[in-house]
Image (cartoon, rainbow, N blue to C red):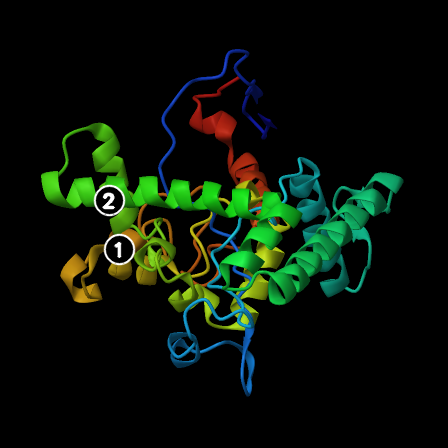
Amino acid sequence: MSGSNAGTKEVKFTAKTKPSVKKALKTTVAPNQVIMAPDGKGTPNEVRTDEELEQTPLRDPTAVDVQFPTDSLSASDPRDVVMTQKMELQKQSEENDQPGVTPFGVLTATEDDLEWVRSKREKELDADFMRWFIENFDKMSPEQKAFSREMYPKLYEERMRLADKQLKLAKKIVDLKINGMRTKEDLMLQYAMEAGFVDTDPISNILHPEKSQANKKEKRRQDAFRRGLLNPKRLPRGDWGPWKRGQNATEATGRVASAFGSNKPYRYGTTGVGFTAIGPSDSASEKKTNWQNTVDFLNMADVRGYAAAAGGEE
């Protein structure tokens, strides 16, 4: 990026050839995990209720077994970032009554773009097949379970891998609560919990995943699937699950909002509190991509003179 202005010299910023190594902030495990819980009886857009599941006889050969989440439906595609940027530019151009016209030129759909869309449609087909299989074959009886596991072993392996990840995170949190903070990694995890970057809902209900709030409504599960189709890394501050950071923080710490004091960590980076490079936002909109906002911010900084800020007299 370069910056220029009247009476200033041009300053160029170049990327380092050798990447720096740093520890990433631990946030959550598979924020867009999806559970294929069957529908409840007489409750449209809801999974089966706790009462329906509790009253199901053990090893009922006709009942769908308790469902554990999978993260296999979250697609990691390097094209996601570029396509997200294109979609945001397209939306902005339509809002300006100039469809396809952007500050960077006219948007056109390429063969690669169409291939990207096709790959997402294939992922939808995978998800629908998984749900069909579970509702028809993943029953509670040992005989049916053995048959299903032999027919579709990948489904069971994927869910076990995610369960292992969740158990490891749960163990870290338990260790932190029992022994306190002893390392920098512990400090970072404690901050992540207080700042709302850790979604503890799945691990709080790890033995009874269908009781997880994120899995109780069909809409919530559909939202998780849609978000999982795009690479979560596109989000400015990462991805911490379906809830706002404030709710994650209160759930993870077991404290009400007032216990955090006036300077709440889960507000850092929003509404002018803390540091942000993407401009001020509120807790409801901070999880949007905001790619165009980032471009606007950089342009504004360029006009106001990064060069001048760098001491750039001629």
Disc 2 versus disc 1: distance between alpha carbons?
9 Å
Kindly tell me whether residue 152 is visible in this rendering: no
Residue at the right extreme of this rendering: 111
Residue 158 lies in quadrant: top right
Give the number of marks. 2
Q: Is residue 85 above or below residue 305?
A: below
Front residue of this view, candidates 105 and 5: 105
Residue at the top extreme of this rendering: 18
Residue 182, given in percent of the width and then of the height, sits at 14, 31
- Residue type at mark 2: give it: Ile
The answer to whether 248 appears left or right of 13 in the picture is left
Front residue of this view, candidates 252 and 71: 71
- Residue type at mark 1: give it: Ala
- Where disc 2 sits, the SS reads helix
- What residue is rendered at 64% in x and 50% in y? 229
Q: Is residue 170 above or below residue 260?
A: above
Residue at the front extreme of this rendering: 143
Q: Nearer the viewer, mark 2 or mark 1?
A: 2
Kindly tell me whether residue 168 is visible in this rendering: yes
Q: Residues within 10 Å of mark 2 (few under 14, many from 20)?
A: some
Q: Which residue is mark 2?
A: 173
Front residue of this view, candidates 159 and 180: 159
Q: Earlier in the sequence, mark 2 or mark 1?
A: 2
Residue 205, given in percent of the width and then of the height, sits at 34, 60
Per the rendering, the mark at residue 77 is none
| Marks 2 and 1 close (CB-CB < 8 Å) | yes
Front residue of this view, candidates 186 and 43: 43
- What residue is rendered at 82% in x and 59% in y? 99
The answer to whether 282 appears left or right of 229 in the picture is left
Per the rendering, the mark at residue 252 is 1
Residue at the bottom extreme of this rendering: 42
Q: Residues within 10 Å of mark 1 (few under 14, many from 20)?
A: many
